[in-house]
């Protein structure tokens, strides 16, 4: 971290605007697994589905709790693997989709 | 070995609510055992809706009380019970007639359900396609609450009140002594001795029964749900239901995403399988796209499965069962979350030796063994 840069200025989850400060506070309040942090702070629940932030969050969680990185499980991968418009899931396509 | 007045198995909305109301009655020598984290089972997987629009008197009374308590709990435990209403869309005259009858019954029990014209329904949620809608039922007292905020509120209450809540603590064995009056409950680290054991383990309630050598008539059925990317607040305020489209339900959560599922049973058989299926994604997308066409352009972010813990007649099993001092609060058949406050209050009153105003006789689990099945509560989620 650069000197002078404060945790509240560092955005970890861009979709949901979650800062490092909020994450540290949540971890301190006992939300100390990825599943709990996700539910508490909304990290990883934006349109990117956590593809940008979850690895960063994992690292912060490891550092704050003194655990090894590989001890920290990522939230379970669920379908769909990329955000999927309902019309595609329903089997609909239009000319502009092709 | 720890002695307790009451041990509750299950840290979902039901078990937490029973613990909360016990503490309010002054019964504080209790332990709640949760095998994973609070709300990790069916509570955290549910559709978040809370409604009193049912078709039978006992359930309407139970839910009327529940909605009062949801309000009180929201204030006390710092979560939002958002009374945005439940909007049932009716697509045929037949459906309208049926719901008009239910509305009369609901009104007679103090639930202010109204029938709306298609245009009035659209006023409640402008994204709905009303071209085939003949009318709607709307109860403004129904609503939704975010399960994570609810269980977190309970957990913080227990911490403040110094009640024992053990997460990541599975029950590994139960021994019955003195004809079952005394129960020894084993967990990996500790054992608990109690006369009163409450089984609030949801879809896993039969597994707790197995440990006691009794059969509990609850079967988990898989139901799936989706959530979309977040949208502007107020996009879909009420919980919107269509019985015509496989009993589909959807609403916007406090976090912005559109959450929803299908009330119709997905599988013929009971299962502990929780995998999501591609087929469901197609079914729900068709249903949602028909009800609210603009949703076709929303993106599904996540898709998961949970259980409706079904009892043989689709109604909860509440009360003492087979072993003295063993109370069931299970078999909610898809309605456990919304019923949790009034069930918690009633069970706490009964367990602590008092009386309850709620129709618990109707939900007596022994009815199943006597062959007295009730009419199933209106199912959709």
Image (tube, rainbow, N blue to C red):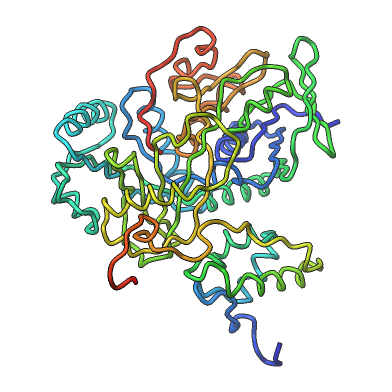
| Residue B315 pos. (x, y %) | 45, 24
Numbered marks: total: 0
Q: Residue at x 59, y 51 (%)?
A: B152
Left or right position of B122 against B86: left
Q: State whether residue B242 is above or below residue B226.
A: above
Decide: is B313 above or below B226: above
Looking at the rendering, which quadrant does residue B117 occupy? top left
Question: Which residue is at a point 46% across and 65% down the rendered structure image?
Answer: A83
x and y percentages locating residue B244 in the rendered image:
27, 39
The quarter of the image holding the C terminus of chain B is top left
- The residue closer to the viewer here, A17 or A83, is A83
Residue B193 figure quarter: top right
Q: Is residue B279 left or right of residue B203?
A: left
Task: List x then y, in percent, for residue B239.
Answer: 33, 48
Q: Is residue B201 left or right of residue B146?
A: right
**Residue B69, picture quadrant:** top left
In the picture, the quarter occupied by the N terminus of chain B is top right
Q: Residue at x 57, y 80 (%)?
A: A11
User: Taking B119 as reference, is B41 left or right?
Assistant: right
Q: Residue B185 in the image: state x and y as whole percent.
A: 78, 28
Q: Residue at x 28, y 31 (%)?
A: B110
Judging depth in this view, the residue of B209 and B152 nearest the camera is: B209
Residue furthest to the top in view is B370
Q: Choose between B36 and B287: the one closer to the eye.
A: B287
């Amino acid at each position: 971290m650069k000197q002078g840069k404060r945790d509240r200025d560092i955005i970890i989850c861009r979709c949901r605007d979650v800062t490092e400060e909020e994450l540290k506070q949540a971890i301190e309040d006992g939300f100390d697994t990825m599943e709990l942090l996700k539910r508490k702070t909304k990290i990883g629940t934006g349109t990117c589905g956590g593809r940008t932030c979850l690895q960063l969050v994992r690292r912060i969680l490891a550092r704050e709790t003194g655990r090894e990185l590989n001890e920290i499980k990522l939230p379970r991968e669920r379908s769909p693997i990329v955000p999927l418009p309902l019309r595609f899931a329903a089997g609909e396509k239009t000319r502009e989709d092709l | 070995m720890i002695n307790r007045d009451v041990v509750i198995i299950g840290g979902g909305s039901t078990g937490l609510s029973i613990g909360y109301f016990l503490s309010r009655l002054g019964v504080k020598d209790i332990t709640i055992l949760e095998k994973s984290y609070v709300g990790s089972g069916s509570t955290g997987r549910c559709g978040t809706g809370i409604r009193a629009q049912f078709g039978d008197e006992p359930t309407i009374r139970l839910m009327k009380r529940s909605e009062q308590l949801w309000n009180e709990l929201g204030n006390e435990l710092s979560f939002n019970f958002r009374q945005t209403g439940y909007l049932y869309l009716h697509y045929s005259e037949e459906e309208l007639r049926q719901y008009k009858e239910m509305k009369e019954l609901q009104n007679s029990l103090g639930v202010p359900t109204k029938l709306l014209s298609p245009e009035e329904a659209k006023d409640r949620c402008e994204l709905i396609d009303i071209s085939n809608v003949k009318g709607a039922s709307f109860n403004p007292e129904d609503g939704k609450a975010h399960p994570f905020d609810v269980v977190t509120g309970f957990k913080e209450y227990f911490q403040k009140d110094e009640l024992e809540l053990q997460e990541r603590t599975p029950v590994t064995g139960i021994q019955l002594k003195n004809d079952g009056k005394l129960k020894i409950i084993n967990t990996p680290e500790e054992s608990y001795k109690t006369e009163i054991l409450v089984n609030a383990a949801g879809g896993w309630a039969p597994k707790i029964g197995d440990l006691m050598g009794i059969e509990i008539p609850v079967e988990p059925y898989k139901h799936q749900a989706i959530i979309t990317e977040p949208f502007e607040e107020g996009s879909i305020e009420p919980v919107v239901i269509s019985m015509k489209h496989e009993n589909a339900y959807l609403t916007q959560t406090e976090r912005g995403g559109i959450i929803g599922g299908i009330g119709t049973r997905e599988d013929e058989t009971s299962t502990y399988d929780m995998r999501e299926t591609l087929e469901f994604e197609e079914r729900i997308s068709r249903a949602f796209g028909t009800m609210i066409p603009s949703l076709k352009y929303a993106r599904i972010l996540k898709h998961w499965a949970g259980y409706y813990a079904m009892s043989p007649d689709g109604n909860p099993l509440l009360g003492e069962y087979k072993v003295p001092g063993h109370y069931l609060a299970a078999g909610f058949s898809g309605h456990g979350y919304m019923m949790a406050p009034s069930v918690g209050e009633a069970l706490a009153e009964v367990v602590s030796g008092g009386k309850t105003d709620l129709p618990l006789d109707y939900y007596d689990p022994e009815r199943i063994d006597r062959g007295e099945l009730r009419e199933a509560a209106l199912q959709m989620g």
